[in-house]
Image (cartoon, helix red, strand yellow):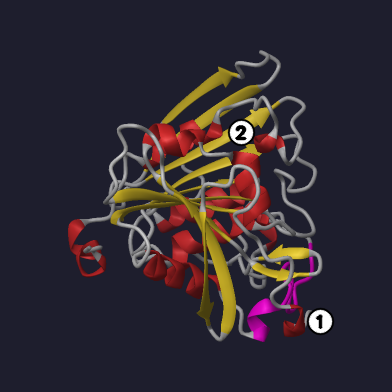
Amino acid sequence: MLSLRALPANAANCSGSPADCVEVRFTVDGLERLYQYHVPQGPTCPSFQLPVVMFLHGGGGNATHTRESMGYASSDKNCYLLVFPQAVQFPAGGIWTPGNCIGIPASSGYRGPTTDPGCGFGLENLGINDVHYIGALLDDLKGHVSYDARRVYASGFSHGGGMIHRLACELSERIAAIAPLEGTIKIPQCTSSRGVSVMEWAALTDTTSPFAGGTSDTSVPYTISVHLTNLQLPAFAAPTQTSVSPSPLTPTITDSIRIWQTERDGSTVVLHTLTGALQHTWLFDHPVAFDWQEINWTFFKQYSLPLQESKRRSVRH
């Protein structure tokens, strides 16, 4: 059993490289939490009403390492606020609360424990809830920088990608679109209050988070089916569009793209299935097989929350 006495451990900071970021510490559910953010430095970037892209690190990670691995090039080019939330830190690193796979059907591909804590770590039994944390982070961020509450987006890697799926289902009134990478859904049902557009990235050769599921993950097809059902399409509906793109690095790595236009709130589901010898951490390779940050932004910028939903959360300075 994990102990709250491990909190906080391995605290992140903004002294690494690149270092032009701000770190904020605040309290959520009685626990000290932190996040980091980078204000875009592009010469034409405004200083107010910025769109927000949050990126959640993988299991065992932290904000600083992820920030240093990603850099700010896309943020500075496209003028969005880049935010790095951080999971509660234990000796083995940060752990999110994306769900515990309890109640997920056998068809999901999940092959792990079916009793609490299942594929999770029992953190919610300790009073840790990262849906609360992300909501509180967005509230706290208002006091530090002017951002557009209608244009908040979320991406994340592996365990953090699983958390992003949960946010789309349980914090849909705050998030316009998501783009998880190498991470699948870990809650049995998605019942969002509005349609959230989803773009999933999955490498067929990923053995850490297998495409077909395993002892700690559901499958990628199951994950897509859950979102399609929530967005009022049949679970295994045929995609609206399909295409295949080779990697600019080598034609032996390809991206098979499937797009579903859904019936709910103009939302879209996109699946990038990557072939070739790509590891779980391919997105942090230098050079990277696909410029996923730019592709994510091209996807995100199409969507915003309805004015009436974000009105009471509008940022005023």
Question: Which is in the foreground here, disc 1 or disc 2?
Answer: 1
Residue type, label 1: Met
Relative to residue 175, is residue 114 drawn left or right? right
Please tell me which residue is depicted at 60% across the width and 63% down the height of the picture: 86
Residue 266, image x, y percentages: 29, 46
Q: Which residue is mark 2?
A: 273
User: Which quarter of the rendering shows the N terminus?
Assistant: bottom right
Secondary structure, magenta segment, majority class: loop
Residue type, label 2: Thr
What segment is highlighted magenta in the picture?
112-126
Please tell me which residue is depicted at 60% across the width and 51% down the height of the picture: 222
User: Looking at the rendering, which quadrant does residue 113 occupy?
Assistant: bottom right
- Residue nearest the observer in this picture, 89 or 174: 89
Please tell me which residue is depicted at 64% across the width and 48% down the height of the picture: 66
User: Can residue 153 be seen in the rendering of this structure?
Assistant: yes
Residue 177, image x, y percentages: 40, 50
Q: Which residue is mark 1?
A: 1
Tell me if residue 154 is in the magenta stretch: no
- Residue nearest the observer in this picture, 75 or 307: 75
Q: How many marks?
A: 2
**Distance from the alpha carbon under mark 1 to that under mark 2:** 36 Å
227 relative to 119, above or below: above
Determine whether the residue tagged by mark 2 lies in a helix, strand or loop.
Answer: strand
Of the image marks 1 and 2, the number of the one nearer the N terminus: 1
- Residue nearest the observer in this picture, 114 or 70: 70
